[in-house]
Image: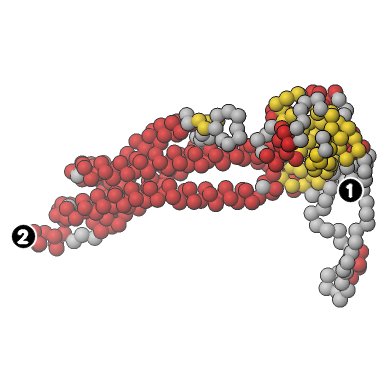
Amino acid sequence: MRLLIFIALKHLLARKRQSLVSLTGIVLGVAFFLAISSIMQGSENDFIRRLIDNSPHITISDEFRDPRVQPLEKLYGDESAVAISGVKPVTETRGIRGYQKTLSYLNTLPDVQASPVLTGQGIISFAGQETGVTFNGMIPEEIDHVSTIRQYVVEGSLERLFSNADGVLIGVGLARQLSLSLNDTISVSAQGGRVRTFKIVGLFKTGRGSYDNRQAFITLKRAQALFNRPNRINSILIKLDDPNNALIRAREIEKVVKYKSESWQEMSEDLMSTLAIRNKIMYTVVSAVLVVAALGIYNVISTVVMEKHRDIAILKSMGFPSRDIRIIFLVQGVLLGIAGNLAGIPLGMAFMKGLAQIKFRPPGAGEQISMPTSWDLQQFAIAIAFAMLASIMASFLPARKASHVQPVDILRGGL
């Protein structure tokens, strides 16, 4: 085997310029693959991190995934000639029934932090202006367990909401829209004509316009009074130690509590599908660079095969089998692939390091942020594997052609 490697290396060194060009293609292909995949994967990780941090991992709502089966359907089944139409549900006060029992069950799970929430629509009236807002009634001491709103508070504090039962936390977009400021008093009216007065104890800015303009936080007791739902909630927010387990845990929880339990993956299914498609496009485009580099290897080894017909014939005459001839030219592709990886990976890491130093300010952001990059070992493994595969595949056809050379035909032609 050592002799075969020596012969393969001599063939490559005999055409140094062409071999160097092919090697450069593999090096740049690996480096660009790592740089682009690092940015794409880094931006995806950053997006998912923000999505996970700013949203509950699991949300239990006061709905059922499947509609209730009507008694008539239970009696006659689906195959009967009896049909039900125009069913009107009984008017009732919505909410999760017996939520204290559900919370007791959730608190027994070691990796779960849960908190009850009552959300509802209210209208803020101030200086003759009226704006519809979604109010989130929460237990102040548990907000930090299931929400990251604290890190977005820019004026006032979350502690003021803890100590002030009539306090409200609103977004800076809503405050700007209604010309409100910290410590102002606002009137909120809800369905049924109930009106309550709240004092602004804090302002938050998440950077998401729809959230900053239409969301507010109050205490759970005040929300129950405002929406006339005493001792009722309509959702339970859950945070997990490992967000990636949310899909499985949501199914397990739903089987026990019966109410609809949605994981962050299920609620963001369209976004996750978009990211998956984007990754496929990215890997296809970047892999094209390595495919082009592989064509360079194919060209070099094909040229060597054409120039070395006489040498191949002599080797076969000396007793080298076709398998060894094939191995000689396959080894050339492997050597180029290994050398390309050895030089391309450090160059790719340098590109990744340089990209991470780039800072930019997104529209509406107050400060600069760095370019998100990923140093996941998986992308290094993919780059190495694809470069080696491309090199071997590019050398396969020339190697196969070389193994089929007939010594008699070549030597007779040379006489």
* Image coordinates for residue 54, horizontal then vertical, percent: 69, 36
Q: Is residue 276 above or below residue 242?
A: below
Residue in the foreground of this view, choosing between 276 and 132: 132
Q: Which mark is residue 94?
A: 1
Mark whose residue sits in front, 1 or 2: 1
Q: Identify the residue at horizontal 72%, vertical 33% (top origin).
A: 176
Q: Determine whether, in the image, residue 126 is placed left or right of residue 414.
A: right
Instruction: Determine crowd level at label 2: few under 14, some 14-19, many 20+ residues with C-alpha closer than 10 A.
Output: few
- Dot 2 lies on which element? loop
Q: Identify the residue at horizontal 50%, vertical 30% (top origin).
A: 359
Instruction: Determine crowd level at label 1: few under 14, some 14-19, many 20+ residues with C-alpha closer than 10 A.
Output: few
> How many numbered circles does the render carry?
2
Residue in the foreground of this view, choosing between 54 and 70: 54
- Dot 1 lies on which element? loop
Q: Look at label 2 and name its amino acid.
A: Leu
* Image coordinates for residue 415, horizontal then vertical, percent: 5, 60
Q: Residue furthest bottom?
A: 81
* Image coordinates for residue 293, horizontal then vertical, percent: 33, 48
Q: Is residue 409 visible?
A: yes
Q: Determine whether, in the image, residue 389 is placed left or right of residue 364.
A: left
Q: Determine whether, in the image, residue 116 is placed left or right of residue 318.
A: right
Q: Which mark is residue 415?
A: 2
